[in-house]
Image (cartoon, rainbow, N blue to C red):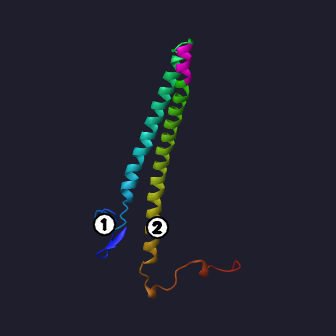
Amino acid sequence: MRESQGRVRDRRGKVPVGDDGKVLDIKTADLKLSAPVFHEQAKNLSTALTNLVKALDGFGKPWGDDEQGSAFGDAYEPQQKAIERGAGILVLGLTSIHEAMIDMSDGHVDNDELIAGMFAKVNPQDGPQDGPQDAPQDGAE
């Protein structure tokens, strides 16, 4: 990134901004709406993987026990297991993206509320609010 004309630009000369010109534009509603898509696709991929494993396991070893069949099986079986492991990792990845998007959205909402509370106007005529410093001490009321 380099600064040009008072704005930070990437190596292509573009200014990284959101839709409304903000540099960081996080739409928590969009995060919450898109998160279930990752959950649904994780379920779909998991179902497809389960069906694939069952089908392939159901075929047994149709390549035979002769020399060519054994050579094929020796090469095929590790690749099948690698594909199954890879698809399983994708299922976990999609699930973790879903959870992360929900957590990120909740975190931004909580942070926005915290910041809004820091800048909330307090009317000095209202006096101090009840809080830990105003609580009765030693059981006295």
Residue 15's disc is: 1
Q: Is residue 80 above or below residue 132?
A: above
Q: Position of residue 138 (x, y in %)?
A: 71, 79
Identify the residue shown where x is 44% and y is 82%. Answer: 122
- Depth-wise, is mark 1 or mark 2 nearer the camera? 1
Verify whether residue 111 appears in magenta: no
Q: Position of residue 105 (x, y in %)?
A: 44, 58
Left or right of residue 90: residue 5: left
Identify the residue shown where x is 48% and y is 31%. Answer: 49
Q: Single out the residue that lies furthest toward the bottom.
A: 125
Q: Is residue 30 above or below residue 4?
A: above
Where on the picture, by quarter, is residue 60?
Answer: top right
Where on the picture, by quarter, is residue 134?
Answer: bottom right
Q: Position of residue 123 (x, y in %)?
A: 43, 84
- SS at circle 2: helix
- SS at circle 1: loop
Q: Residues within 10 Å of mark 1 (few under 14, many from 20)?
A: some
Q: Is residue 115 above or below residue 59?
A: below
Segment tinted magenta in the rendering: 67-74
Between 10 and 118, which is closer to the camera in this rendering?
10
Q: CA distance from mark 1 to mark 2?
A: 26 Å
Dominant secondary structure of the residues highlighted in magenta in the image:
helix
Q: Position of residue 104 (x, y in %)?
A: 46, 58
Identify the residue shown where x is 38% and y is 50%. Answer: 34
Q: Amino acid at mark 1?
A: Val
Q: Single out the residue that lies furthest toward the right.
A: 138
Between 61 and 110, which is closer to the camera in this rendering?
61
Quickly name the residue at label 2.
111
Q: Quadrant of the C terminus?
A: bottom right
Between 135 and 20, which is closer to the camera in this rendering?
20
Q: Amino acid at mark 2?
A: Asn
